Amino acid sequence: MIKNTISKHYKTFIIVLVVLQFASCTSLYDATYTKPVLVDQKLSKETKRLHKKLFMISKAGFAIGQQDATAYGIGWKKIDNANIWRSDMHDVSGSFPSIYGFDIAKIEFDSKKNIDSVDFGVMRNLIVEAHKKGGLITISWHAYNPVNDASSWDSIPAVSKIIKTGAFKPKYKKWVLKVANFLKSLKYKGREIPVIFRPFHEMNGDWFWWGDKYCTPEDYKTLWRETVHMLRDEYDVHNLLYVYSPNRLKKNDDYLKYYPGDNYVDIFGVDIYDYKRSDEFETSLKNDLHLVKNIATQKDKLYALTETGLESVTTNNWFTETLYPNIENSGISWILFWRNANRKHHYMPYKYHKNEGDFKKFQSLTETLFLKDLKNLKF
């Protein structure tokens, strides 16, 4: 108990030091946080402040997030408990996440619910509430295949047909407009909520229709750039930071193989899961995060561990002994654990889970920044 108390005080002390470092100047920019080159020159003030907050977070530790954290958990759904703000993470540790992940797949069909059966109205309310409480929002898009309306995991090539003058480009543009309308509908006190937007992720894998097996690197880059132009220039979406996030790298993989360019990406990411092979996972964390850090530093970009986890969290003390030692002092801005769908498919302990105690220890460590920790990051 004494050790945990000391750790919590030390964490607060580190955050206060970071705050003081930036407190000498009321301007958004100063000698330490210089004006970054971002994708959108018309970016909202709130979204510029989000970028600075992510920068500050990376100096104090890393924000802790989870996909659909407040939408559902093991044995409960938000839609059944409209007045309850809940997450399995809070049930276990007493702390809410500081990053809230959502996915907007099926928005393209005007569906009431997304790919994981989260009602879009509920999602919007959860985003507003998270933002109101000081949380940060990241949104991915497991877009359906525009050629045949099949899921993201469809194998029919589509990218070449939705770029340039491709036959399905008009259809794709309508889809992007629906994405734009949803993103612009996320408002609090009349102002659009800043969003960390992560489209077409894990492109170096072969499981999505935009992946390595189904399009060339040049076509992928064109798809990314054209999507940015649609959102930013045609549909006036100015509350987004754009994240480029490949999957974990194989030995000779080029992280920048699909990179659309510095003018089209704000943040670097990488998705690394533990497939019950902790040695491989730890090696990937060390190597990939080191590589991403070097590239991000050269290009003056932020970077993050954009998806991670061990399904069912089966390894004892996974958070404190497998994960944390390999992300400590890494410089990442945040880490996003995947969702808690059910007892077989979950990435966060829930009450009475065997790793409940381990996550409590993880919560008390110096660099893990939860929602209550972000409240000390004032600027």
Image (cartoon, rainbow, N blue to C red):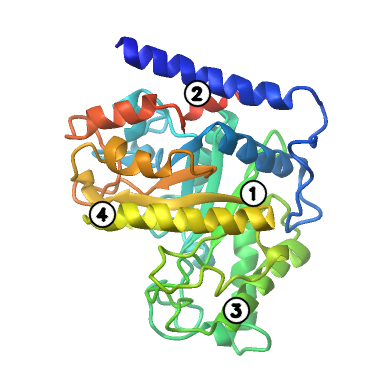
Q: Nearer the viewer, residue 366 or 251?
A: 251
Three-letter code for the amino acid on which mark 4 is drawn: Asp
Instruction: Indicate the amino acid at tag 3.
Output: Lys
- The answer to whether residue 281 is above or below residue 83 is below
Residue 155 placement, left or right of 167: left
Residue 53: image location, x then y, percent: 64, 36
Per the rendering, the mark at residue 171 is 3
Residue 100, above or below 39: above
The quadrant the N terminus occupies is top left
Q: Up-down: is 197 above or below 193?
A: below
Q: Quick check: marks 2 and 1 in contact, CB under 8 Å?
A: no
Badge 3 marks a residue whose secondary structure is helix
Residue at left offset 28%, top offset 49%: 341
Query: Is label 1 or label 4 in front?
Result: 4
Q: Which residue is mark 2?
A: 372
Q: Which mark is residue 271?
A: none
Q: Position of residue 71 (x, y in %)?
A: 40, 42
Query: In the rendered image, which quarter is residue 136 located in?
Result: top right
How far apart marks 4 and 2 lie (CA) works out to: 33 Å
Which residue is under mark 4?
Answer: 279
In the rendered structure, which disc, 2 or 3, sits on the residue that comes first in sequence? 3
Q: Which residue is mark 1?
A: 185
